Amino acid sequence: MKKGLVLAGIGLFNILFLIMSISAGIYFSQPEQIYNLGEVISNDVTVDSSEAGFLKIDLVCDGDNAVNIFNGVPVEGKTHIEFPLIKEYMEGINGNCYFLAKQNNLIQESRHFKISNVLDIRLDSDSFFIKPGESIIFSGMVERLSGARANGTIVFSISSLDSGDSTARITDGRFSINFDSGENMAAGMYRIDAFAYEESLGSKTSEGISSASLEIAQILKGIEIVLNVQSLDPGQNFSFKPRLLDQTEQSMEGEISIVITDQNSNLIFEKVVPSEGTIVYNTLTNMSPGNYQIEASSSQFSETKTFYVNEKKSASIELVNGTLIITNTGNVVLEEYPVEIDLSGTSFVEKINLFPGEKQEFKLTGDGFYNVKVTEGGKEFLQTGVALTGGAIGVKDIKEAGSMALNSPIIWIFLIIILGGAVLFFFRNIFKKRSFAYPFDTLQRKFNTKSKVIELKATGNVKREREEVTFKRKFEQKTNEKNNFSSAGVNQAEKVLVLDGQKSRATVIILKIKNKLASSAKENLEKSIEHVYEKKAAVYEKGDDISIIFSPLMTRTFKNEIEATKSAEKIAFLLSENNRRFKEKIDFGIGINSGDIINKIEDKKLKFTALGNLIIGAKKLAEISDKQILISKEAYEKAMNEIKVVKKETKNGEIYEVQKTLDREKNKDFIKGFLGRMEKDNKNNQNQRYSGQGM
């Protein structure tokens, strides 16, 4: 009986021991999934064991790297650990980690987590585009992989630049830094590197890097002209190369307008060439000596270089049927210029006086065959076996220098052409078609029509004469009023080759009429243009195109792009009103362009030579316009502060459709008054036609 009780007690003890062994354990609170260096990792540890003992906890990471974070006896089976993840403790330990706890024979691992030293940098934009001299702001967000916002420092560096790094603070994850590109920053693509880091106790804990692209635009900063020679002889080939220069004086693409003028500012050469294109200019043998100027221009930039044409004395010798012809082929006057003429040993010296291009003839006389040798300027002309007649050996001056000019058939042809041109010019008004462009023609036609009606209605010559005199006075008064609108009465333009004018930047309106107009539509077209004379613009008409030139020479302003746009807006509005109010329609297009012209005022006309694509560019815009106002990029950039446009892309580049000018409200009174006059004039014209039919 006692033995059974002992055995039962031993069994019960073993069962209790097993139960205590099974229930014994080490428990960790759940750690976060990710920690960054610089943060503090904390955890609550509970030990459930019937035996008290020494507890050791290590932080174990990739590669079995471990650091001890706790050694001690838990109080009532519990302990709390906090461990700062700083360089001094971690010494490069990071990656996938866990806590490893040991107590007596118990070993327990916590849930695995990650310790990282990486910061996530997100720039607000990954690409930037600016012009040199402009500023840009780099901004964005920096976070730890744990999701917490970083606080630290960010450093920006730009590849290929020696400007140094830019530094900014990261506060609550945000950063912002201003970057000035500099006026001379080279065009191209750059890489922006952003390096962010956090630090503790002077040591970096977490860091990250990100990058973006920066494009610096290439802009025109100047023009260079490279000459192959500074001085040359007349007749010598001369070459030069114009270059467009960007902000770092590197060559860039584009077109350059080239003009060469002589010492009297006369235009002798004009061409549009690409940048870096070599221009070969062949000088004439009689090109006047002196300084010549090359002007290269593009946009608002221009550059001039001078070259010098040397003085050169030169003559050519011809012998035709016993007549010696000496021509001045140089570029200076041959004054008392000695020429030695040898006829088979008999020498004669003649001193000639010739302007460049002029000739002088000498008759060689003799009796037989002679060897003729002519020496001038160190050169010799020799012809053997020349048959001479006339008796005694001699040299006779046929005429004074220049006398052969009138005997030249070329000169006579030239004189006939000049005479014919003068005759055509004299009679041009007889054959000239009716113009839509000039209001004075309209007034003159009204005057003629009125005089005719008065003559038909008049009962006597005295009344007719009185009526005509009265109307003539009214016509002269209106004409004088119109003349006050223009510069010295100038209202017409003429496209000619101007060699001695002034170079100006002008603006042109091309009004293209695309259909055949009836009489009333023609009159309304004329009226829609009249207001441009108040702006002191000049009008040139060719075919279906009416060109309105705004030149500083007449307008006395350099803001002609703005005035031209306002005038074009009035024209478009008035023509559109004609199409809305009347049956007879006007199909039109309007184009505006800016560029350089050579111009002058002569015979009460603005005579001009357009450079580059000034007229052609405006014509192209007018052709594609459907009752719109289309303005080129060059003109828009000069007037952009005072007009509103819509940008359009075409195969030929950017164009802009004008929506309105900013002072459009100021035109209401003008437009209202004009429409009233338009309707009144139309009624008067109809009444006059009915009266004419009744008579």
Image: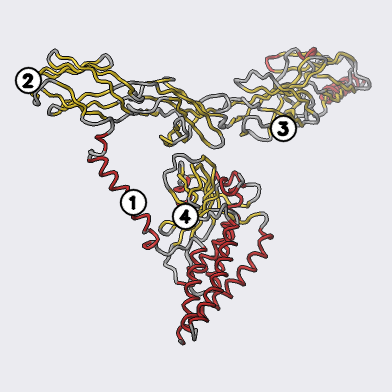
Q: Name the residue under label 3.
A: 139
Q: SS of the residue at dot 1?
A: helix
- Camera-nearest label, 4 or 1: 1
User: Decide: marks 2, 4 in contact (CB < 8 A)?
Assistant: no
Q: How far apart are marks 4 and 1 (CA)?
A: 20 Å
Distance (Cα) linking label 3 and label 4: 57 Å
Q: Which residue is drawn at 12% across and 15% down?
A: 344
The local secondary structure at tag 3 comes to: strand
- State which mark lies toward you, 2 or 1: 2
For the image, the number of numbered tags is: 4
Q: Is residue 585 among the parts visible in the rendering?
A: no
Sequence-first tag of 2 and 3: 3
Residue that sits furthest to the left in the current view? 368
Question: Callout 2: 10 Å neighbours few (<14), some, many (20+)?
Answer: some
- Residue 540's tag is 4
User: Which callout, 2 or 3, points to the residue nearer the camera?
Assistant: 2
- Kindly report which numbered mark, 2 or 4, lies closer to the viewer in this rendering: 2
The N terminus, quarter of image: top right
Marks 2 and 1, Cα distance to the nearest angstrom?
Answer: 49 Å
> Which amino acid lies under the numbered mark 4 shown in the image of this protein?
Tyr
Which quadrant: the C terminus? bottom left
Mark 2, residue position: 369
Residue identifier under label 1: 421
Amino acid type, residue under disc 3 in the picture: Ser
Q: Which mark's residue is nearer the viewer, 1 or 3?
A: 1
Packing grade of label 1 (10 A; few <14, some 14-19, many >=20) is few
First reached walking from the N terminus: tag 4 or tag 1: 1
> At numbered mark 2, what does the secondary structure look like: helix, strand or loop?
strand
